[in-house]
Image (cartoon, rainbow, N blue to C red):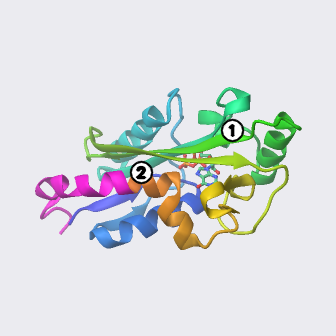
């Protein structure tokens, strides 16, 4: 099987992506640290394709990228594709979001995840998207996960992403749903990748 470069610099995301990819038989490698891709798209899907394509071209290997973020209804979908740029650290981003919402009663939000896989020439081979609806709490709860997890409450589980076991987040999250949509399509790649990287 071919090598697949995981095109992310976010350690929380990397850990979750590896958990989905581990059973697929690809040899996973990390994106070179100095390779930074500018996220100029205005949708998650566009940015996932940009990251996968540019990392694939730069490394000459197959690459997978995830672009994700939080859309809050009362903030007209913000921070959206700017979720990573909403503050310098996870706690600054959370604080800014809680301040922006204040005592707003409408706390409805959703996490969105777009995934793209690019061939070594940069063309896109597969794409998928997953959404997980939830609500923004007034204060953080839980210590697991990463990013905005402590303020994202999932009503069906009665827990935030940061409170639930990793296996539950793995199954129900936006990323989990995107990978569930992507996995059946992986078979169509085997003919293209078979025998490479050996
Ligand atoms: P790469 O582009 O290198 O993958 P990034 O952190 O810049 O890393 P994005 O541009 O996709 O990634 O930004 C995603 C933002 O949304 C970032 O602030 C994450 O912490 C947050 N985010 C994405 N998925 C999340 C999840 O499952 N739980 C909590 N926060 C999440």
Which sits in the foreground, 185 or 12? 185
Q: Is residue 167 left or right of residue 48?
A: right
In the figure, is residue 26 to the left or right of 39?
A: left
Of callouts 2 and 1, the N-terminal one: 1
Q: Position of residue 104 (x, y in %)?
A: 84, 35
On screen, residue 36 versus residue 56, left or right, reads right
Q: Position of residue 83 (x, y in %)?
A: 65, 40
Q: Which residue is mark 1?
A: 85
Number of other residues with Cα within 10 Å of mark 1, as a class: few under 14, some 14 to 19, many 20 or more: few
User: What is the distance, in whole Å, between disc 2 and disc 1 at their CAs?
Assistant: 22 Å
Q: Residue at x 53, y 28 (%)?
A: 40
**Secondary structure at numbered mark 2:** helix
Whether label 1 lies within 8 Å of ligand 1 gets the answer: yes
Nearer to us in this view, 9 or 87: 87
Tell me the SS state at disc 1. helix
Of the 4 image quadrants, the one containing the N terminus is: bottom left
User: Is residue 33 highlighted in magenta?
Assistant: no
Residue 31 seen by the camera: no
Residue 59 position in % (x across, y down): 35, 50
For the view shown, which residue lies furthest in the front direction? Answer: 156
Residue found 65% across the figure and 61% down from its top: 161
Q: Quadrant of the C terminus?
A: bottom left
- Residue numbers of the magenta segment: 180-198
Q: Which residue is mark 2?
A: 178
């Amino acid at each position: 099987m071919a090598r697949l470069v995981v095109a992310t610099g976010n350690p929380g995301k990397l850990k979750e992506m590896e958990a989905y990819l581990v059973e697929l038989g690809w040899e996973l490698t990390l994106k070179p640290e100095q390779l930074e891709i500018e996220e100029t798209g205005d949708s998650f899907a566009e940015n996932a394709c940009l990251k996968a394509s540019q990392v694939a071209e730069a490394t000459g290997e197959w690459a997978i990228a995830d672009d994700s973020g939080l859309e809050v209804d009362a903030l007209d979908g913000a921070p959206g594709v700017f979720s990573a740029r909403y503050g310098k650290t996870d706690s600054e981003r959370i604080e800014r979001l809680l301040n922006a919402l204040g005592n707003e009663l409408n706390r409805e939000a959703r996490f969105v995840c777009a995934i793209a896989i690019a061939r070594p020439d940069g063309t896109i081979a597969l794409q998928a998207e997953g959404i997980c609806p939830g609500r923004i709490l007034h204060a953080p709860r839980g210590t697991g996960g990463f990013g905005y997890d402590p303020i994202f409450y999932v009503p069906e589980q009665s827990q935030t992403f940061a409170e639930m076991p990793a296996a539950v987040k793995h199954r129900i999250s936006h990323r989990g749903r995107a990978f569930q949509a992507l996995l059946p399509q992986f078979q169509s790649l085997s003919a293209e990748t078979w025998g490479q990287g050996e």
